[in-house]
Amino acid sequence: MSVIFSNVSYEYPAEEDSLLAVKNVSLEIADGSFVCVCGENGSGKSTLAKLMNGLLIPSEGEVTVDGASTNTEDESALFAIRRKIGMVFQNPDNQMVASIIEDEIAFGPENLGVPREEIEERIAYALGAVGMEEYRHQTPYKLSGGQKQRIAIAAVLAMRPEILVLDESTAMLDPKGRQEVLSVAHELNKQGITVVLITHFMEEAVKADRVIVMKEGSVALDGTPEIVFSDPERIKSYDLELPVPDYVAAALRKEGFSLPDKIYGEEELAEAVCRSL
């Protein structure tokens, strides 16, 4: 199942002047891919996420999900699209509706009219997918930020989406919490779920299949991490920073070091430098 943007623009209404948040964007999110959308604050990346499942409707152009347009007055058709694309937002506390974790996971399927026997299966599947089975009967409010986001992801997974959109879902987490959420996202992608990660942390983008850089509502860069991060000065011109290992690797390549195109972390960089030496 793919998501296709065709010449999409979105304008937020304002009291004086309207704000054009997304400008003439055309792109496709391929089935089974892991796509990272990056950009500074106000670049339009979160607006792009909300356009994917009809939370926002394009001012111009069209977004289609599995061939169905979000620009429809048919509420049932829009509801079907939203069932296919699950979204997890920035603050996990704002997404919690129940005081017990299993009730939190069951909330979505119950509202979809899923039979109780199947809901039990979905709770077990969702908690297992995010590694939180042992917390089933606990309250989410005593969990760490990373654990809460894993529960938020589980609540979305219980509704069996085909695409998971993480809209700045790691922004409020510490490094450990971010790593917990990213590990879950990559594991789900290996299982066949399409993942779209909206972030301003460049180190989260290096393991994606594709990186889309937004600037002032438009797509500034679009390609593999190797292509997007190949020019540190170009990345800086978009008010972004390369992941430290990539920045160091790029500088060493200029000095004649033979290093792999993909450098995923400090340890891998150290090993690559030692091999080169």
Image: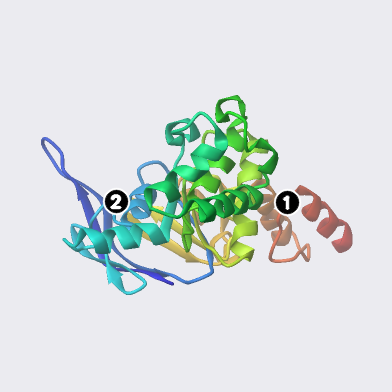
Considering every residue shown, the one lying at the far bottom of the view is 67
Q: Look at the image and tell me whether residue 218 can be seen.
A: yes
**Are the residues flagged by discs 1 and 2 in contact, CB closer than 8 Å?**
no
Q: In this view, does 68 lie to the left or right of 99?
A: left
Residue behind mark 1: 265
Identify which residue is drawn at 59% across, 62% down: 189
Q: Is residue 139 left or right of residue 40?
A: right
Q: Is residue 89 above or below residue 216?
A: above
Q: Which of 98 and 196 is in front in this view?
A: 98
Measured in 3D between alpha carbons, the distance from the residue under mark 1 to the one under mark 2, in whole angstroms, is 36 Å
Q: Is residue 246 above or below residue 17?
A: below
Classify the position of the C terminus by image quarter.
bottom right
Classify the position of the N terminus by image quarter.
bottom left
Query: Which circle, 1 or 2, is nearer the viewer?
Result: 2
Instruction: Choose top left, top right, bottom left or bottom right for residue 249.
Output: bottom right
Residue 20 image point, x, y percent: 22, 50
Q: Is residue 80 above or below residue 175?
A: below
- Mark 2 secondary-structure assignment: loop
Residue behind mark 2: 55
Instruction: Choose top left, top right, bottom left or bottom right for residue 147.
Output: top right
Residue 49 image point, x, y percent: 38, 53
Q: Is residue 182 left or right of residue 3?
A: right
Q: Look at the image and tell me whether residue 198 can be seen.
A: no
Residue 106 image point, x, y percent: 49, 44
Identify which residue is drawn at 45% across, 62% down: 221
Considering every residue shown, the one lying at the far top of the view is 142
Identify which residue is drawn at 11% across, 35% down: 15
Residue 11 image point, x, y percent: 20, 50
